Image: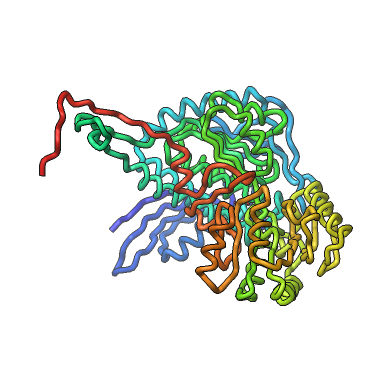
């Protein structure tokens, strides 16, 4: 039985630095023979022709090799012009008329790694115009077809995980393994969004009027979810791919168009991801990726009358964006000072492991990282000893070597972290490790006996630096958590689930984890910050809801009508 018939044209295949040129055309089909599925293919290479067959594993491996192009090469060759990556609009990769570019510094080498286009205001206006036109047609595309396109996008993205991970390593110094995980997680997020969109948008509401006093049953209301229009997505440097698709996929499945403003560091990873979307065959103009200087195009984008929704993740720039944006839905995640509350009856081994993973992974550059530990005095010594012992095993070095602690994203970020550390030093905090910094690489430190007068007790370092506050009562810990302007997540370690629930209720943060470090995922869970940590709730389901509005049609009957049994 023939299941499918495909033509593969394998052009240049680059494995690592060595160029292996494979140029052969392969025509094949899946066949079921004696219960097992085989790929039967005919090949021609020069004047040699033949027929072969092999099992699915061999085919998958071959496809993996086909996908092993490198950043800006092979599969991605169209997205670069000389040494500058292009921007994406109207379904095409383009060079900006500005003739200018923005350099991206590799945090490990401190040298310019990549360059992207510095787009002009005119190019922004044009992209928004095209997105508005494309959205009208996309909203009329059947939901199952939108879902199909997203599934294709997810598949291509996962196939291209290695070259995209390479960009993440070079642009934001994400450890290689975590970089691959980010891309795979993003593919899963896109597929889940497609499925969740089908579930959510397939349903509307049917209401009858006689439930409200004074009404008979002569009005039928049909309410459904419709798209907002054009969504502006602004992801941060630390998850340029994942936090971009967490905005793109819900927006597209809901029938919106999308303008993506990649972060400067992370832009090239974003552009590679967008090329996967391009290859999945979405309508021209529906998605644009505009790179450039925030100072030149930022305000225009966020205040553009053609933008109908903004989804932003980043720092306090979000506060000024929300002040400037018009009357449109906003989804903002602006960081956290996630408090880890450790009680006397806690499993200290579990708590210590979670501090290591939840506080130091990606060098603490996660909004959900553990950013302050409030531990009961009676168990503080034991907890600190365990954490310090585990910290000594963290590998510090380069992302290419898969080290646990890698350089932080920029020199200004490293300077800011150093400022917090020096402030704590002068105010008498106890350091369990010596302070060490080389370039942007900061060795992890645990800062003990931190007091409320120290900046590190309140501010978000976004680095491998965690303060410990020793508390006498649980209330003291809860108070510290609630007194902070940030309120994204928090966690509590205790074996008493009843106590944990009461504490979770008392901690005024968007999410409280019981017996685990803060985390955004699984990606369909609600994810929201209170106070200065943001507005709106994310997570796949909530994002789809947020990127739609309700439309009602009311049928007015000439007389009351009741459904009879
Ligand atoms: O940095 C902000 C991210 O939303 C955190 O995501 O918990 O999966 O690391 P994560």
> In this figure, which colouring scheme has been used for the structure?
rainbow
Q: Residue at x 23, y 30 (%)?
A: 215
Residue at figure coordinates x 61%, y 75% from the top left: 345
The picture places residue 556, in percent across and down from the top left corner, at 22, 26
User: Taking 562 as reference, is 306 left or right?
Assistant: right
Residue 86 sits in which quadrant? Answer: top right
Q: What residue is at 58 percent from the left and 25 percent from the top?
A: 304
Q: Is residue 287 visible?
A: no
Which residue appears farthest toward the right when viewing the image?
426
| Residue 317, picture quadrant | top right
Work out whether residue 15 or residue 463 is closer to the camera in this orientation and state it: 463
Q: Position of residue 129 (x, y in %)?
A: 53, 24
Q: Is residue 310 left or right of residue 314?
A: left
> Is 45 placed left or right of 82 in the picture?
left
Residue 103 falls in image quadrant: top right
Residue closer to the observer: 367 or 61: 367
Q: Quadrant of ligand 1?
A: bottom right
Q: Nearer the viewer, residue 150 or 353?
A: 353
Q: Point out residue 13 in the picture as x, y percentages from the top left corner.
A: 59, 53
User: Quick one: quadrant of the C terminus?
Assistant: top left
Question: What residue sits 66% from the left and 31% below the top?
Answer: 298
Q: Is residue 547 above or below residue 161?
A: above
Which quarter of the figure is the N terminus placed in?
bottom left
Residue 349 drawn above or below residue 198: below
Q: Position of residue 11 (x, y in %)?
A: 55, 48
């Amino acid at each position: 039985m023939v299941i499918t018939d495909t033509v593969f044209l394998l052009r240049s295949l680059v494995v690592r630095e060595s160029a292996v040129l494979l140029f052969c055309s392969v025509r094949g089909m899946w066949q079921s023979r004696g219960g097992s599925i085989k790929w039967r293919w005919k090949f021609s290479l020069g004047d040699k022709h033949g027929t072969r067959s092999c099992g699915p594993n061999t085919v998958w491996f071959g496809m993996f090799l086909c996908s092993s192009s490198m950043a800006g090469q092979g599969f991605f060759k169209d997205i670069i012009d000389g040494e500058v990556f292009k921007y994406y609009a109207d379904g095409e990769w383009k060079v900006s008329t500005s003739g200018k570019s923005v350099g991206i510094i590799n945090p490990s080498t401190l040298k310019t790694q990549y360059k992207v286009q510095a787009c002009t205001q005119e190019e922004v206006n044009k992209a928004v115009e095209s997105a508005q036109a494309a959205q009208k047609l996309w909203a009329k595309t059947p939901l199952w077809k939108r879902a199909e396109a997203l599934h294709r996008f997810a598949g291509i993205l996962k196939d291209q995980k290695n070259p995209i991970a390479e960009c993440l390593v070079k642009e934001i110094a994400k450890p290689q393994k975590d970089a691959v995980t980010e891309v795979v997680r993003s593919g899963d997020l896109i597929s889940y969004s497609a499925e969740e969109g089908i579930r959510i948008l397939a349903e509307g509401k049917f209401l009858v009027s006689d439930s409200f006093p004074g009404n008979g049953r002569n009005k039928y209301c049909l309410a459904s979810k419709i798209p907002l229009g054009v969504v502006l997505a602004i992801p941060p440097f630390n998850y340029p791919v994942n936090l971009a698709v967490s905005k793109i996929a819900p927006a597209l499945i809901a029938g919106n168009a999308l303008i993506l403003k990649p972060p400067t560091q992370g832009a090239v990873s974003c552009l590679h991801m967008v090329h996967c979307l391009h290859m999945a065959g979405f309508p021209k103009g529906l998605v644009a990726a505009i790179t450039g200087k925030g100072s030149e195009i930022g305000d225009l984008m966020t205040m553009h009358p053609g933008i109908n929704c903004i989804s932003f993740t980043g720092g306090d720039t979000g506060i000024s964006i929300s002040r400037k944006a018009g009357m449109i839905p906003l989804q903002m995640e602006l960081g956290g000072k996630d408090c880890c509350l450790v009680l006397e009856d806690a499993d200290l081994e579990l708590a210590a492991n979670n501090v290591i993973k939840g506080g130091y992974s990606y060098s603490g550059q996660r909004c959900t990282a553990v950013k302050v530990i409030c531990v009961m005095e009676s168990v503080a010594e034991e907890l600190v000893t365990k954490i310090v012992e585990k910290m000594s095993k963290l590998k510090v070095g380069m992302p290419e070597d898969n080290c646990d602690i890698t350089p932080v994203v920029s020199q200004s970020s490293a300077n800011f972290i150093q400022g917090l550390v020096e402030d704590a030093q002068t105010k008498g905090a106890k350091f369990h490790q010596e302070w060490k910094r080389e370039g942007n690489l900061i060795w992890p430190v645990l800062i003990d006996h931190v007091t409320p007068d120290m900046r590190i007790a309140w501010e978000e370092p976004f680095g491998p630096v965690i303060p410990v506050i020793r508390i006498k009562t649980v209330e003291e810990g809860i108070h510290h958590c609630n007194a902070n302007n940030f309120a994204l997540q928090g966690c509590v370690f205790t074996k008493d689930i009843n106590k944990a629930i009461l504490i979770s209720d008392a901690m005024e943060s968007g999410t409280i984890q019981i017996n685990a470090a803060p985390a955004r995922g699984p990606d369909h869970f609600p994810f929201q910050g209170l106070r200065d940590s943001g507005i709106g709730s994310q997570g796949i389901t909530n994002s789809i809801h947020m990127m739609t509005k309700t439309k009602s049609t009311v049928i007015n009957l000439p007389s009351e009508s009741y459904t009879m049994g």
